[in-house]
Amino acid sequence: MSLEVKLKHRLGAFALDIAFTTKGQVTALFGPSGAGKSSVVAAIAGLWRPREGRIAVAGRVLTDAPKLFVPPEQRRLAVVFQDARLFPHMTVENNLKFGWRRATPKADAAEIAHVIDLLGLGALLARRTRDLSGGEKSRVALGRALLASPDMLLLDEPLAALDATRRGEILPYLERLARDTKLPMLYVSHQVDEVARLADEIVVLQNGRVAAQGPVFELLTDVEQIAGVPPLGAVFDAIVVEHQPDGLSRLRFDGGVLFVPALPGAPGDRVRVRLRAEDLMLALEEPRHISANNVLACVLRAVKAAGDHVDVQLLCGGTRLVSRITGASAARLGLAPGQAVYAVVKAVTVAREG
Amino acid sequence: MGGFLSPAEATALWLSLQISAVAVAAALPFAFAMALLLARHRFFGAGVVDAIVHLPLVLPPVAVGYLLLVVFGGRGVIGSWLWDTFGIRFVFSWTGAALASALITFPLQVRAIRLALESTDSGLTAAARTLGAGLWDRLINITLPLALPGIVSGAITAFAASLGEFGAIITFVSNIPGETQTLPLAIYAALQSPGGEMAAARLCSLSIGLALIFVTAGNLAAKRIWR
């Protein structure tokens, strides 16, 4: 599945000039508000006609302005809007089935049951939408989009209207969706943590242009901050190997083994691992007799001063890591590119919501 | 009713209800289309169209009746064509009274529906589009039900206003008992005849009662739907 977007449009002082092609299952459209993210989504969905441009999903050309324009109702792209946009005169069940009734081919009864179960909507079906909480509304909007059996799911900051608690409730559903289905998604967000948890690939927008594009694993862990945000310590996918009797789970990744506090998944499951750069400690010699469960052998690639601290780019096998340390520590250790170093990772600092 | 109203007065009441019902029902589809046009589309001359729609509300009803006579009268452009082609005639007929009422109360319906449309999120129809709903599908399943409170309250208000229409009707279709003599025209006729004050007072209190019932019903309807 591929998404091909090329847009040119001028709106007063704001000029949109965007071109990217992505083949990832979950692509994040990332950037500050006003960068043009929502315009891109609206153009892909067909709710907005750019003056110039070409949009194709899985090779199917949807917009080739000004010659060709497939209307939104024929695009088979479901959108989850920031404000949910549930139909207030229908029950939750009728909202869920709105797109399903109009889809060809339709999801069968088992798939409907699966979506209702996946999103925990069973108890809500007979409810009116105005009686739902913000988080429930988001889940219904997501279910409604899924049941339309779209070729691609467009998520336009679906969590932006929610508070931190509600966001935390919905994210696992989105993670399950990204992991358990093959449905391609375009996920619009300005939140690094959401992107790090869900996306494979990032397209970074700034001032109506594509500032950077690449795999999440690289773009979010780059000391040059090419995504426009401070780097994370690590974002990578690992495989659950074993749940040990001592309460730790052993993960395998491209770079070795990582021990983390017990995970829910079964051996063989893929999990997304995230670390904060502040939580990665550096050592020049392999430390022994320490409480940290993980000592990863790395090669130092770059040292980058960022304000009053230093971001150190590491490569552990094929996995990029970033350690954020003080300038004083960096000077004391005499860090230089090419050096062999050890990254010390406490198991408890590994983010494991997913 | 028989004890309270004379047979002629009962006829006037019945005729009023009939004419108003037909007027409101006939104008409703046009009012909905016009409200949709004004609420959801920006086009050149929208202000002029809006002003023309509101014209019957501010124009002297007698003037509206006169204009109707010019256009739909026996020698009017449309009137003569309708008579020659279909044998349809508005003048001196209850259908003419309905036409006059429809025109006068048209802006009331447009306003109520337009307000309802403007208070509903146009993002909902966009969402319906992305879910595969075409133009008529959206109109029937999203726009119409969301505008329903406005449609119902507009129709009831227009119905109540139509019951009181006088000037346009008497000018266009005259005051013919049993054909075009609605309640207000009957009140007027009663006042013109000697000793008719009692009849006028009866019909007047009846009008007040009807107006109160329908205005209240209109307000209730607007509140109840989708709550």
Image (cartoon, rainbow, N blue to C red):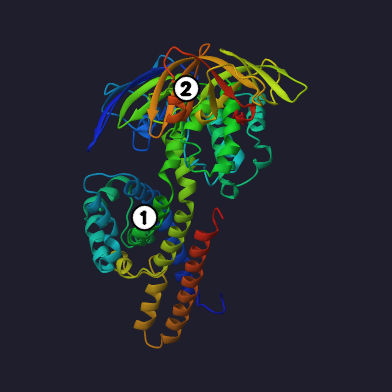
Residue A54 seen in the current view: yes
Residue B68, given in percent of the width and then of the height, sits at 26, 59
Query: Can you say whether B79 is above or below A54 in the image?
Result: below
State the quadrant of the C terminus of chain A.
top right
User: On residue A41, which mark appears?
Assistant: none
Q: Is mark 2 on a helix, strand or loop?
A: helix
- Position of residue A185 measured from the top left corner of the image (x, y, whole percent): 49, 24
**Chain under callout 2:** A
Relative horizontal placement of residue A37, taking residue A325 as reference (left or right) = left
Label 1 marks a residue whose chain is B
Residue at 55% of width from left, 59% of height from top?
B224
Residue at 29% of width from left, 56% of height from top? B53
Residue under the point 50% across and 40% down: A84
Q: In this view, does A353 lie to the left or right of A218?
A: right
Q: Give the class, few, some or many, for how many residues have Cα within 10 Å of label 2's Cα (few <14, many ≥20).
A: few
The foreground one among B19 and B63 is B63
Residue placed most toward the observer, B152 or B4: B152
Identified by mark 2, the residue type is Leu
The residue pinned by badge 2 equals A333
Does the image show residue A152?
no
- Quadrant of residue A346 in the image? top right
Mark drawn on residue B110: 1
| Image position, residue A52 (x, y; %) | 26, 24
